[in-house]
C-alpha cells in the first residue's frame, strides 16, 4: 500500500456517523472498550467475504460494504440481538482510495440506520477480503 493503514483509518474509518454512548474507547488504540447494558449478554458474530467467492470483482465497493455489514446484521437478528458495535479487518491489494471511499459509503449508510459503531479492526495488504465482527446484546436468559 502506498499510503499506510493509519492514513486510511484516519481518512475513511475514523469518520463515521455513529458515536454510541456505550463505546468507552473506539478507533485509534490497540483495543476497543464497550459497555454491555445492565441485564444483557453479549452476542458476537463474524463473517468473511472474499473477492471472487462472496462478491464479484466488478461489484461496486458500496454494495460490498453494505453486504459485509448486512450479513452480520442478519446473524444477530436470527438470535434476537440488538446490534451495537463492529470491528473490521480489511485486506486490500493496494490503497485504492476510491474503492475504500465507496466501501465506507455502503457500510456507513447501513451502520447509521442500525446505529452500529465501528470500534476498530485492522487493515493489511493482500487479496481483497473483508472480515467483520459484529457485537450486539440480548436480555439475560433469552438464550
Image (tube, rainbow, N blue to C red):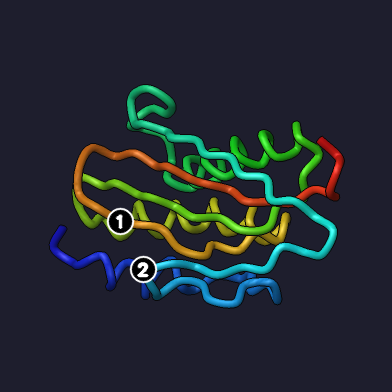
| Left or right: residue 79 compared with residue 70 | right
- Residue 108 left/right relative to 128: right
| Label 1 crowd bin: few (<14), some (14–19), many (20+), radius 10 Å | some
Measured as percent of width and height from the top left, residue 114 is found at 72, 55
First-in-chain label (1 vs 2): 2
User: From the image, which quarter does the N terminus lie in?
Assistant: bottom left
Pointer 2 local density, CA inside 10 Å: few below 14, some 14–19, many at least 20: some
Q: Which mark is residue 139?
A: none
Instruction: Please tell me which residue lies in front, 124 or 32.
Output: 32
Q: Is residue 17 left or right of residue 113?
A: left
Label 2 residue SS: helix
Name which residue lies at 54% across and 51% down.
Answer: 106
- Secondary structure at badge 1 equals strand
Residue 28: give x, y in percent of width and height.
40, 75
| Residue 80 falls in image quadrant | top right
Which residue is at the front of the view, 25 or 53?
Answer: 25
Instruction: Identify the residue position indicated by label 2 in the image.
Output: 9
Disc 1 vs disc 2: Cβ atoms closer than 8 Å? yes
Indicate the quadrant containing the C terminus: top left, top right, bottom left or bottom right: top right
- The image position of residue 110, as x and y in percent, is 64, 52
Tell which residue pokes out farthest to the top in this image.
Answer: 53
Residue 78 at x, y = what percent?
75, 31
Total numbered badges shown on the rendered structure: 2
Residue at image position (62%, 51%) is 135
CA distance separating discs 1 and 2: 8 Å
Q: Which residue is mark 1?
A: 123
Above or below, 98 against 20 in this view is above
Q: Nearer the viewer, residue 24 or 68?
A: 24
The quarter of the picture where residue 81 lies is top right
Amino acid at each position: 500500500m502506498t499510503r499506510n493503514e493509519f492514513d486510511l483509518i484516519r481518512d475513511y474509518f475514523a469518520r463515521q456517523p455513529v458515536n454510541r454512548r456505550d463505546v468507552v474507547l473506539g478507533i485509534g488504540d490497540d483495543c476497543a472498550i464497550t459497555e454491555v447494558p445492565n441485564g444483557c449478554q453479549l452476542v458476537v458474530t463474524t463473517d468473511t467475504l472474499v473477492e471472487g467467492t462472496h462478491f464479484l470483482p466488478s461489484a461496486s465497493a458500496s454494495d460490498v460494504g453494505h453486504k459485509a455489514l448486512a450479513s452480520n446484521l442478519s446473524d444477530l437478528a436470527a438470535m434476537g440481538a440488538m446490534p451495537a458495535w463492529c470491528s473490521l479487518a480489511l485486506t486490500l491489494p493496494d490503497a485504492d482510495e476510491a474503492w475504500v471511499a465507496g466501501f465506507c459509503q455502503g457500510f456507513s449508510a447501513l451502520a447509521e440506520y442500525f446505529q452500529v459503531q465501528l470500534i476498530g479492526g485492522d487493515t493489511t495488504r493482500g487479496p481483497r477480503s473483508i472480515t467483520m465482527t459484529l457485537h450486539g446484546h440480548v436480555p439475560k436468559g433469552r438464550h
